[in-house]
Amino acid sequence: MEINPLSIILVKSDSKGDRMLFRYPHATNHQRDSSQCLKRKNPYSMIIAEDSLQVSMPFPNPSNGNLTGLSDEVLSTLFAVKPELCECKFELKLNDVRFVGHPTLLPSRGPKEVNSSMLFNVVFALQAQASHSVVKCYYDLSRRLGIALRHEERRCGFLTEEIKIMVSTHDEVAARSEEESDSDESPYETILQKSSLARDLKSIFNSLSTSGIINIMIDKWIQVSFCLPQKVHQTHKKGFVVDPEIIDRCLNSLRPYHGLLLLTEPTDLRDSLPTDHSPALCRLIQMYNPLKSLQTLAADSDLTLAQVFQLTGHLVYWAKATIIYPLCESNVYVVSPDAVLTNRMLEAFSEQFPGMCLLQVISEFSLPTSISQKLNPLSQPQQQTQLVKIIIWLLKNHLLLQLHTYVQYMPTVHGRSSVNIADAPNGLSSSPPDTLPEDESAVALDDGSWSLSVTPKGTPNDSKADISLDKTDDLYSYQSDGYPSDDIILLERLCRMGYFKGGHHLEEIMYLENIRRSQLLQILDKFRDVLITCESEDPAMALFYSQPASR
């Protein structure tokens, strides 16, 4: 998989020249590159020019997930860039390998060292077909490591000491290799034993290849935290690649009526937080409940809604939580289209809910089913609690998808039959136009016009604006026997605000217009001839239920 790195490389360049300091994974005694193993037995032998012209240029080769084909000298020459290119993105593609790094320049530490600035570069080798999003994440990690190492160098000269250890080890191994012509010793194993920075780089590589989460202390002083979302989200959904752009689109669609569902236990999440964690995040986790909306969580946690949004985005990015609609009886769920059942899931479900079968439970949601349909009025409270726990477990494992009701206004001949002005409520006209007027601005009042109060989109009912509708703009002329005028006024207001164009679900309309579900259901029932409903997922949550991308 192109998400995993092929190698991590540390290169330095100073007044003494450029040098490859460390690379991992390095070639073992039985896996050394042929270009590095060929040595002249006689140091005074001559190289024939004709032979050198026939020697092919080595190219990087991602063999078995490792980087081979280029010598240390070639790599150090490529990655030791000019000072003008420091503090910028470094990206180089050679055949099937792409190198990504952030060259960092260290100025001289003392007045005696005038021209002793040093450049170092932490470079990641990736598959050439790695996506732009993956490359961007690795560049961000290289930049963070550069900032941390520069900080430690200024604080206590940590990088200088580590470089001395690595350079001396390289020289010692090279000296032994000259004495013993058949020696094939790798200096990197010795460097791993002596250098803490080398062990940190090895730990970073292993974490990127396994979990995708890095929490490491450089020099036991400064912490570097990093998350590779394309990797970490696969722990909850195998094979599903979530790019940061998908998470950004989800967070941009986030609304106060949405809820939060932790993918790990709250106690485990609190224990995993670093010592300098945000108190606001701790309060949010403490007040967490999947039945609460983000707005309610903000009030209970004594945080602003903007803070809750930021913390929610942080948890979603690190695959610690996902976005849901707060659990309630009206929620409708169906089996996710890309749900995958594994033996591990079956065993985990049986262990969590003894005596129940996951296959039987998931089959009950083959068709869209609401929680109210699953509840039995005669059941015990323990059974209702268990049902909620089961739905939460299914949502955590991305086995269920919530559906919302969207409304589309579609006038019909029967729904727009002519009525007399005297019979129509509020003096509605009997000659409706064919299309919905585009202009929602106020129209001048005359003898046959009427006005009503509407709510601007995105605000509750406390801020009102008057819209005047001419009697010729009779959009909803129905046979109005038994229809209260309040229902027609509400219908007119919601249509004018654009809520009945199929782009807003009922929960969103309820929040934006501060109305009850029963009012909307009453409107849908009374005007069912012209209001068409359909069920679909919320765009903010559907991004995490798409089919796995072909990588």
Image: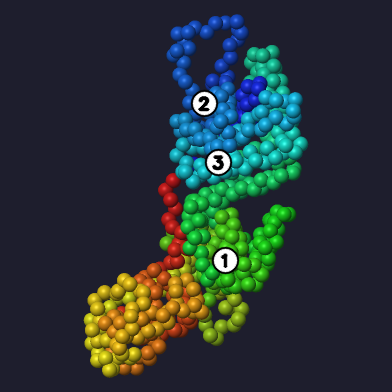
Report the side of 338 relative to 276 (left or right). left
| Crowd class of label 2 (few under 14; some 14 to 19; many from 20; radius 10 Å) | some
Disc 3, SS: helix
Q: Earlier in the sequence, mark 3 or mark 2?
A: 2
Q: Amino acid at mark 3?
A: Tyr
> Mark 1 vs mark 2: which is more N-terminal?
2
Q: In the image, residue 24 lies at what x, y percent?
A: 61, 33
Give the quadrant of residue 480.
bottom left
Can residue 180 be seen from the camera position used here?
A: no
Q: Quadrant of residue 118?
A: top right
- Nearer mark to the viewer, of 1 and 3: 3
Quadrant in which residue 178 is drawn: top right
Q: Residue at x 24, y 76 (%)?
A: 434
Residue for badge 3: 139
Q: Which residue is farthest right?
A: 156
Q: Of circles 1 and 2, which is in front?
A: 1
- Mark 1 is on which residue type? Leu
Tell whether 307 sits left or right of 376.
right
Q: What residue does disc 1 label?
A: 260
Query: Looking at the image, which is closer to me, 234 or 407?
Result: 407
- Is mark 1 in CB contact (under 8 Å) with mark 2? no
Identify whether 310 is placed above or below 108: below
Q: Is residue 216 visible?
A: yes
Q: Which residue is mark 2?
A: 69
At horizontal 26% and vertical 74% (from top left) the residue drawn is 435
Question: Looking at numbered disc 2 in the image, what kind of residue is underneath it?
Answer: Gly
Crowding at mark 3 (Cα within 10 Å: few <14, some 14-19, many 20+): many
- Give the class, few, some or many, for how many residues have Cα within 10 Å of label 1's Cα (few <14, many ≥20): many
- Coloring basis for residues: rainbow
